[in-house]
Amino acid sequence: MRRRAQNSIGRGRYGLLGLLPVLVALLLMAGLPSVHTAHADPSTGSMHVVVPTPSSDGKTVQGPVHTNVSVSASQTTAGATYSLGWATTTAGCATGFTAFTSVAPVTADDGGNFTATFVWPTAAGNPGALYNICASDTANPTTNVITADQVFQVLGATAPQITLAQAPSATATATATGKTFYAGGPVQVRGKSFLPVGTTVDIFITSSPTFSPSDFQPDNALKTLDNSQIISDSQGQFTANVLLPNIITGQLFLYAVSTDAVSNGPPTFPPSLVASRTIQISAPLPTPTAQPSPTPDNHTGQTGGNSDQTTRIVAIAALGGLSLILFIIGGILIASAALGSGKPPTGSGGSRSQPDSARSDPRW
């Protein structure tokens, strides 16, 4: 009996050991779905702000309301459509998501990548506040939500804007729509709410009512009259006198933009700050005709006009002198003629001839 019991125990012990690999295999098989789920987790992915340029620590981007914010996402769910939005840092993207109205949902490509640009809304425009930037899968809005690596800090509740005026010493012409500026002439541009402080600004003229990334061509930026850079001050303001092109006229659009655009793509992104104003440019003002300067006389050192006058005076004096000489000669001739007619005639011997009556006098 004892031997049988021991044999039974041995068989049971070895039977359990034989089942151990089976149990391990079952546990591994049971864990496979969870491993697969983790690999295909729709909440994976990353999103990074490209424009505006992030801070030195890579955690913050800044600007006033109406700032153009451009993001690039990777490792998201391929083929998923994402809605872009914002949330307070307290609520977070998963529960406090509010969609941007300035951009349509975007679809990730086969590699799980997408890019988007949106305008920061006034609804999230509390100066100094920090906001999350979010991307929410429209099919799984509660489980597939991506939060950008950077938060957006609002620096101003007013959008960037500009005004135009005549540059100092320029002549303005009033029209029905404002002031007319002349091709090749100056214009004064004043901007405000170009934040953060020290933002570098370029100014362009285009015929389009919207400024696209391809319009950002630094070589085409208008030059300041003193060739200085345009940089916003401690209030986000600037004043610049720039020279208009001399080859385009009509009603056009003048843009003042930040220089953080990404124009060398793909992809391309617009500047973070853009402000525009229509401008009427007329044909260039005619160039004044230069008046000929007097030519100095080589002999007298006087101007040509004085030389001509001197010549006339000399000619008049000469004519007067000639007339006087002729008058004197004429007087002499008249006097000589008068004296010659009263002298008695003389004979051939030089004696005076006698009248015929004297020769016939009977007394002789």
Image (cartoon, grey):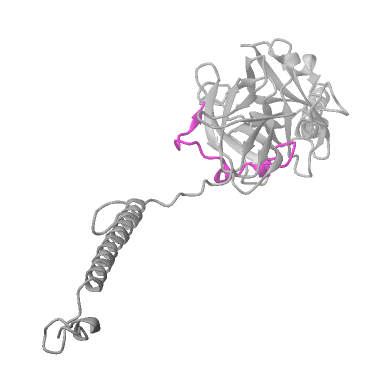
Q: Residue 18: where, in percent of width, then height?
A: 79, 34
Residue closest to the eye, 60 or 331: 331
Is residue 173 visible to the viewer in this orientation of the structure?
yes
Q: Quadrant of residue 75?
A: top right
Residue in the picture at 20% in, 73% down = 343
Q: Quadrant of residue 73?
A: top right
Say above or below: 252 vs 12: below
| Quadrant in the picture for the C terminus | bottom left
Give the extent of the magenta segment: 206-231
Q: Is residue 212 left or right of residue 322?
A: right
Q: Residue furthest right?
A: 139
Q: Is residue 10 left or right of residue 150?
A: right
| Number of marks | 0
Q: Quadrant of residue 331?
A: bottom left
Q: Residue 102: where, in percent of width, then height?
A: 79, 27
Q: Residue 15: where, in percent of width, then height?
A: 81, 30
Q: Residue 140: where, in percent of width, then height?
A: 86, 26
Residue closest to the eye, 262 or 256: 256
Residue closest to the eye, 73 or 250: 250
Inspect the magenta stretch and tell me whether residue 34 lies in it: no
Q: Is residue 38 left or right of residue 214?
A: right
Magenta portion: prevailing SS class:
loop
Say above or below: 59 vs 114: above
